[in-house]
Image: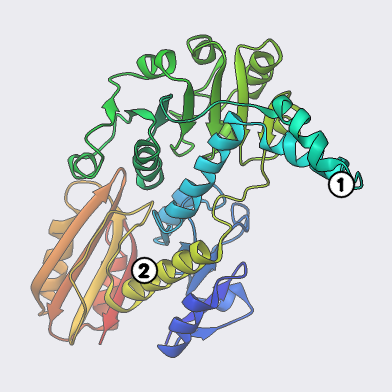
Amino acid sequence: MYCIHCMNNISTVGTDALEAAGYAFVEDPAAANAWLVRSANLNEMEMPHDLLAIARAGAGVNNIPVERCAQQGVVVFNTPGANANAVKELVICGMLLACRDIIGGVEWVHEASDDPQIAKRAEKAKKRFAGFELAGKRVGVIGLGAIGAEVADALIALGAEVMGYDPYLSINAAWGLDRRIEHATDLDQLLSACDFVTLHVPATDSTRGMISAEAISKMKHGAVLLNFARDALVDEQALAEALDDGKLARYVTDFANPASANMKNAIVLPHLGASTGEAEDNCAVMAANQLRDYLENGNIVNSVNYGRVDLGPLVSGTRLALFHENVQGVIGEVSQAIARGGLNIENMSNVSRGANAYTLLEVTGNVTDALVSELEGLTGIRRVRHIVR
C-alpha cells in the first residue's frame, strides 16, 4: 500500500481514515508516495521520484510549486469549500467589528474593571463606541466561489444589499446564488457603489495588486475594505495612505504583516479564517479522500495543476494513468503503443489544463514492464502509472 508523509499536523479524522484503509505514515518525506500539507513551504523542496501527489488541506496553494509538480507528473490537490463556512463566519464578524467599535468597548471595560462604579460609568461611556448597522448597507463581494457565494448569501439574510462581481462565475454557481444579489458587470461599478468591499479571489498574476491606488480612488469615501483572501491582492502602501487621509474608514484583514499591523484604522487578525476544529476536520477528510481516489483509482478531483478525470472506482482490472504535454499526436502514439502490446482500451478520459494533460485508460490484457517503458519514452510523456486492483 502507499506511504504518506504529513508536512504539518493534519486532523486525525483524515489521517485515521487513511490508516484504516491500510496506508502507512512515514517520517521521511523522501519515502512517501504522497504528502499532506497545510502551511509548510514546499517551494524550495526537491520532489522525490516516488512522489505521486500533494494534498493541501485548505484552498490556497501559494506554498506549493504547482507548475514544477505538473512537469514531474505530481498531482496537487486542494480542498475548495471545505473551510468556506468558517471563513464566511469570520468575514461577517469582521464586518460587524467595522460597523461598531466593539474592540474599543471591550478595551474600555478591561481598563475600568477595578472600578466599583463601572456599570454607572459604562452608561455614559458607551456613546463613544456607537456605530451603525450592517442592514441596509451595500456590500460588494469580489469573487463568488465557495467562500464568496456563502458570504453573499449570508449578507442577504442579514438585510444588506449585495453586489457581486466575478467574471469567471459558472452557470451552475450562478444558479446557487440568492436571486437578490445584484450582478456587477465590471469592477469599477462595484467599487463606486458599495459601502463595504470584501475580497474572495485567489492571488494570481491577474489579481495581484488589484486593489491599487487607482481602484481605491474609485471607492466611496468612508468605505470599508475587507481582505480574507490574500494580502497580495492589495497595494498596501496605497491602502495605508487611504486610511490615513480618511478616504477609507476601515481595513479588516486576516493577514498580519509589518505593513498591515501598523496601519491606522485597521483591524488585523492572525490568519484565523480556517482556524476552527470543524474546518480542519473537513479539509483533512476531503484531502484524504481525494488522495485515496487518485492513488487507488487514478481519478483526479480538485487538482490545481491537472484537469478533472473520473472513471469511477476500479473494481477490477488495470488502468494506465499518463501525464503528458498538451500537444497534438500524443494520444495517437499512446493508442498505437497499447495496440502493439496486445491490449484493448475499454474506457478512456483525457482532460487538459493549459499545457498539462492527463489521460486515464482502462485496459484489458497484460501490461508488461516493457510496455510501460515504451510509453514513458514517447515524446511529451512525463509520467506513467500502472494501477491494478
Would residue 75 be seen by someone viewing this image from the given angle? yes
Percent position of residue 335, x then y: 12, 65
- Disc 1 is placed on an element classified as loop
Residue that mark 2 sits on: 290
> Which residue shows up at 57% across the image and 15% down it?
222
- Tell me if 330 is positioned left or right of 66 in this view: left
Residue that mark 1 sits on: 113
Percent position of residue 178, x then y: 25, 39
Q: Amino acid at mark 1?
A: Ser
Q: Amino acid at mark 2?
A: Gln
> Which residue shows up at 25% across the image and 87% down it?
389
> Which residue shows up at 28% across the image and 71% down it?
298
Quarter of the image for the N terminus: give it. Answer: bottom left
- Tell me if 136 is positioned left or right of 100 in this view: left
Percent position of residue 302, x then y: 34, 57
- Front-most of residues 83 and 27: 83
- Disc 2 is placed on an element classified as helix
- Front-most of residues 93 and 205: 93
> Which residue shows up at 31% across the image and 67% down it?
376
Quick one: label 2, few (<14), some, or many (20+) residues within 10 Å?
A: many
Spatial CA span between label 1 and label 2 = 51 Å
Q: Quadrant of residue 79?
A: bottom left
User: Eyeballing the image, is 333 above or below 115?
Assistant: below
- Front-most of residues 277 and 346: 277
